[in-house]
Amino acid sequence: MDLANLAAGIVFRRMIAAMKDYADCEIICPNIEDSISDTFHCIPCPPYKRLPYRIEKRLQDCQGYRISESYWAGSTYRKVKSTVSRGGYTAIVSFVSAANFAPLYLGRKLAKKARLPWIVYSVDAIPAPLAWQPNEKLRNKLYRRLDKFVSQAQALFSANPMMMQYEQKTFAHFKGYSGVVLTPCDEAVTYNPDAAHHSTVTFLYAGSLYGPRNIDALLAGFEQYHKKHPEARLVFVGNRYSTDFTGFEQLLNSGAIECHDFRAEMAAFYEQADVLIDLNADIENDVFLSSKVCNYLSYNKSILTISEDGSPVRTLFSGVESIVHSHHHAEEIFLAMEKAAAMIGQAIDDRTELRHQFMPHSVAEKFCRDLEVLTGR
């Protein structure tokens, strides 16, 4: 549903751009960047329009899904079914995220019409775990709807092994192929600052704050660090609530904590940062690996990742010295900040192999090979 600037859209955009070396792709997407539409053949589709918020929410609470998505999928199907049926395609792939299920509805219709294998690739856990979607009644309604579709797919791909295990347990009726498509990282690599010419330390969190991503421990840990290093800064770039910083207004008002709204162009912030912060859910055995920490891999800067035991970031990124792990405890975060900041000026050369696994072309090549096996091509 998006190949522009939303988090999932950025992931999908990187994937499709990298897939062009291994497959011919044609795209159906109502929100697409010119750079993508100029590179690939896009099948025209109707715009996606939501109903007024109150009506949409009331219907969603009642039915468990957004009726505007179902309507868009139906209208798009009627417009493109003839094109797809005679297009000579190998497979239909639905790119899905937790907030956008219309590609699921459309993909199933098109695959059935064209008698093609149907592949589902979700960058998020669907439906979201209760820790992320505490409305159990609404989640159950959504699950029942999703189960009807997912169970009919030939393959289901998730963004990391823990998420895949969650999906296998959730969709017990699904009997197809299960696979992992890692979140492709940013290919850019920036310099590592010279510690000798560094009078301040800047920590950067590049992402939105929502759900169980509790920042209280991070703020308290930074408060301790700031007392010892008064010139230090903690920069947030992304969507947030004003109440997120309650109790830490002094740091905010003094400029020690700096906040910026979400933006697609992040190069300047990465260049100015010394330590990159990854904040995960304050729950054990979470299934999400943030796209931001995957992006961080490409930058020659130390990473401080905050998560609980059993998280994907602890499992996949363990044993790498330049990635410092901490639980959601202020004192532990303070010590982790000290450790990560001590690496400023050092060469970051211990995650070359890890970075390669998350590079867009590595991810796309593996995905396309899996699709070749699934489709017999």
Image: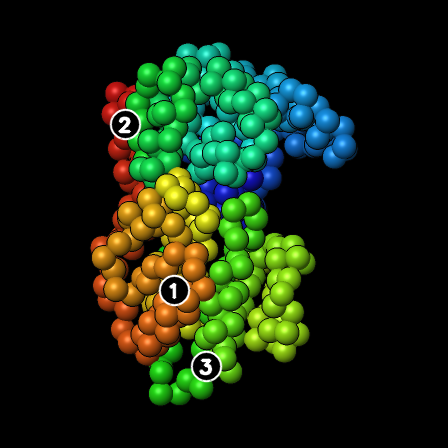
CA gap between label 2 and label 1 equals 46 Å
Q: Position of residue 74 (x, y in %)?
A: 62, 18
- Residue under circle 3? 228
Identified at 38% across, 78% down, the residue is 193
Identified at 27% across, 73% down, the residue is 347
CA gap between label 3 and label 1 equals 15 Å
- Residue under circle 1? 332
Task: Kindly state the secondary structure of the residue where label 2 is placed.
Answer: helix
Q: Position of residue 328 (x, y in %)?
A: 43, 56
Q: Position of residue 254 (x, y in %)?
A: 63, 78
Q: Quadrant of the N terminus?
A: top right
Identified at 61% across, 29% down, the residue is 45
Q: Is residue 195 above or below residue 317?
A: below
- Circle 3: residue type: Lys
- Left or right, residue 312 beside residue 86: left
Asked if one can make out residue 336 in the rendered structure from this viewpoint, the answer is yes
- Circle 2: residue type: Glu
Task: Kindly state the secondary structure of the residue where label 1 is placed.
Answer: helix
- Residue under circle 2? 372
